[in-house]
Image (tube, rainbow, N blue to C red):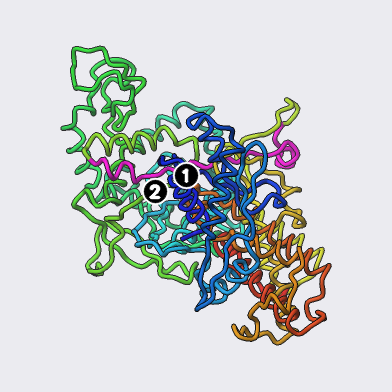
């Protein structure tokens, strides 16, 4: 039982015993200032009106009762109080301070189960389909995709840490309008040469941007693209084969980009296979029978199939004037399904609701350590034990601009009777990545309009490619520190932390100069702290021995800086599930930064190897080891390595 649950339980029992009532759920938090204790509850303020007593009087009675209960824990035959004090503070808070003996037990817990400290209870693992990155295979990935991939890797690692099985999916929209534009450009653009580029997807970036520019000036090109889109729906067409080859070539380059950052995947899903294997056809047959899916015979969406979204109509009725513009088109008037339509079929497959599956084969892109599978429409060698369908939960890391479309998918699953699956589908709609005025100006974007941020545009070629950003960080590190063995690890730490330190659901204004600053609240600062702790242990020839390093209150008087670290270490099992539940890597970033600051203060002010007594030295080495272990664990969840030397 966690400390929070223990406080809730004992406070509930105390209230029931004193006042003969069952209190509401007891709220427990950490005081803003540790001088008031480690935990606090406002239950007395909540009950004041009901009991018609002052909050302070209620708090006094509860605190006295808690002191009588004497919450304890046992280690062998010895019993120790968890809290050294239970105090009240105006206007009626009850504050709890953890005992030094309890905090010593935390250090023992870290060493007893180093690889799993932070998981209070291993979950009964669910299979989770986690979709992230999803760069359209028409050009190079940019820093907006980088934020997506970093958030996705964090979710993968933290949910697997909590006991789940996570299948990481990369959705390749290889028959979409963007890749169709690139295919046209490969034939149309003659003055951009592939040989001028180090990577094919960088070449495709410029081809795509120029094609979009020409298309905006020539309506005939847009018409030609629409006609191409229709032909692409035919798996046997020449254009379909050509676009698949182009998309795969660009996809491989994108995977090479993510390889630089140690981001990998389990399965690449080709959108074309959804059509070829009749996933969409099967889903559409079910949709057409549903009262909330209809064919528009008039209005601005005439000739299209739509999903009811407006909630103004619950049944199919051709006599009612439908507000079709408020509903979502899933099949265009030319018979081509929209992205949302295919996404409905895709999610039905994820949950195992279609009665169909892809064929699978391994993709040898040489971009990751673990096996990478890819869907295919036909294969004589499909492994019988391989499937990525039939998961319990789905997480889609897709930008906030797709919130409406993702809501339609959820609503459609519910329409079809899949209530549980609809509830278990979560859209992680992370904030958009904008460019700061200074960064936009460096890219040649006009900034004289005085805006505070500028959007990236693939159509205009505005954006910072991930490859270019990686090269910039590499160059900065080498200029400032020279070549060193951990350069790649530190570079990736700097890049990923920059993407993860902000609230997932808030927009990020990316400033290149700020992103290249690796000091202060940064990944390298945390990596350096871990390396510093490891260096101390290495000099001491540290080997953990529970008998040698056991804390003895009679022989070691703990300094406030030591207690400060111990208090922070014991919060790690609270931070992990909260960061997972809220898809909030920023919480982990903040936690680790605070841990690093507390350790560095301890390191600078108190001697570890030159401590006054052997017992004190042993204890401080144990504390250092615990900091290093938790730092390494938290950094791993962020997708950041913890080098032992920098």
- Disc on res. 18: 1
Is 602 in front, or is 491?
602
Q: Quadrant of residue 636?
A: bottom right
- Disc on res. 261: none
In the displayed structure, 485 sits above or below 529; it is below
Residue at 57% across, 55% down: 67
Nearer the observer: mark 1 or 2; the answer is 1
Q: Secondary structure at mark 1?
A: helix
**Region in magenta:** 418-446
Could you tell whether 280 is left or right of 164 in the image? left
Residue 458 in view = no
Q: Secondary structure at mark 2?
A: loop
Q: Identify the mark nearer the N-term, 1 or 2.
A: 1
> Residue 537 location in percent, x, y?
71, 80
In the displayed structure, 294 sits above or below 157; it is above
Which residue corresponds to mark 2? 174
Could you tell whether 224 is left or right of 640 in the image? left
Q: Quadrant of residue 129?
A: bottom left
């Amino acid at each position: 039982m966690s400390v929070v649950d223990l406080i809730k339980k004992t406070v509930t029992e105390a209230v029931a015993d004193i006042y003969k009532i069952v209190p509401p759920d007891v709220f427990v938090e950490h005081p803003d200032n540790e001088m008031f204790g480690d935990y606090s509850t406002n239950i007395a303020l909540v009950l004041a009106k009901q009991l018609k007593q002052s909050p302070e009087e209620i708090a006094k009675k509860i605190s006295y009762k808690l002191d009588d209960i004497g919450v304890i824990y046992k280690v062998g035959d010895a019993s120790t109080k968890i809290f050294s004090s239970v105090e009240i503070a105006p206007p009626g808070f009850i504050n709890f301070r953890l005992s030094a003996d309890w905090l010593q037990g935390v250090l023992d817990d870290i060493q007893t189960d180093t690889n799993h400290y932070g998981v209070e209870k291993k979950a009964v693992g669910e299979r989770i389909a986690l979709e992230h990155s999803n760069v359209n295979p028409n050009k190079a990935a940019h820093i907006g995709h980088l934020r997506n991939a970093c958030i996705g890797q964090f979710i993968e690692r933290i949910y697997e840490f909590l006991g789940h099985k996570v299948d990481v999916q990369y959705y390749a929209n290889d028959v979409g309008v963007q890749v169709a534009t690139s295919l046209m450009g490969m034939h149309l653009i003659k003055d951009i040469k592939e040989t001028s580029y180090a990577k094919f997807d960088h070449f495709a970036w410029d081809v795509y941007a120029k094609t979009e520019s020409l298309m905006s000036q020539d309506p005939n090109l847009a018409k030609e693209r629409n006609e191409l889109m229709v032909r692409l729906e035919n798996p046997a067409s020449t254009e379909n084969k050509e676009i698949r080859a182009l998309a795969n070539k660009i996809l491989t380059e994108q995977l090479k980009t993510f390889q630089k950052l140690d981001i990998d995947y389990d399965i690449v899903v080709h959108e074309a296979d959804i059509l070829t294997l009749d996933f969409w056809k099967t889903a559409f047959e079910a949709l057409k029978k549903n009262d909330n899916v209809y064919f528009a015979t008039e209005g601005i969406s005439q000739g299209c199939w739509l999903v009811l979204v407006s909630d103004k109509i619950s049944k199919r009725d051709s006599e009612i004037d439908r507000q079709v513009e408020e509903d979502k088109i899933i099949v265009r008037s030319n018979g081509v399904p929209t992205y949302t339509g295919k996404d409905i079929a895709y999610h039905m497959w994820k949950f195992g609701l279609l009665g169909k599956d892809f064929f699978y084969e391994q993709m040898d892109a040489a971009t990751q350590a673990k096996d990478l599978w890819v869907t295919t429409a036909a294969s004589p060698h499909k492994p019988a034990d391989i499937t990525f369908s039939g998961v319990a939960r789905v997480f889609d890391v897709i930008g906030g601009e797709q919130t409406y479309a993702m809501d339609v998918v959820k609503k459609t699953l519910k329409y079809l009777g899949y209530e549980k699956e609809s509830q278990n589908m979560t859209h992680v709609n992370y904030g958009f990545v904008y460019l700061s005025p200074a960064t936009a100006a460096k890219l040649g974007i006009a900034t004289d309009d005085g805006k505070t941020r500028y959007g990236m545009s693939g159509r205009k070629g505005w954006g910072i490619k991930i490859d270019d950003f990686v090269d910039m960080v590499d160059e900065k590190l080498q200029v400032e520190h020279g070549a060193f063995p951990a350069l790649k690890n530190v570079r990736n730490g700097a890049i990923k932390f920059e993407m993860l330190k902000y609230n997932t659901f808030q927009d990020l204004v990316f400033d290149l100069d700020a992103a290249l600053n690796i000091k202060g609240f940064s990944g390298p600062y945390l990596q350096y702290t871990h390396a510093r702790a490891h260096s101390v242990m290495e000099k001491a020839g540290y080997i953990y021995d529970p008998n040698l390093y056991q804390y003895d209150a009679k022989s070691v008087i703990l300094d406030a800086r030591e207690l400060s670290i111990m208090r922070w270490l014991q919060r790690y099992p609270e931070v992990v599930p909260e960061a997972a539940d809220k898809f909030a890597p920023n919480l982990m970033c903040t936690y680790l930064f605070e841990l690093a600051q507390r350790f560095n203060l301890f390191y600078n002010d108190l001697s570890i190897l030159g401590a006054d007594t052997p017992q004190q030295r042993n204890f401080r080495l144990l504390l250092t080891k615990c900091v290093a272990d938790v730092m390494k664990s938290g950094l791993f969840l962020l997708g950041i390595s913890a080098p032992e030397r920098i």
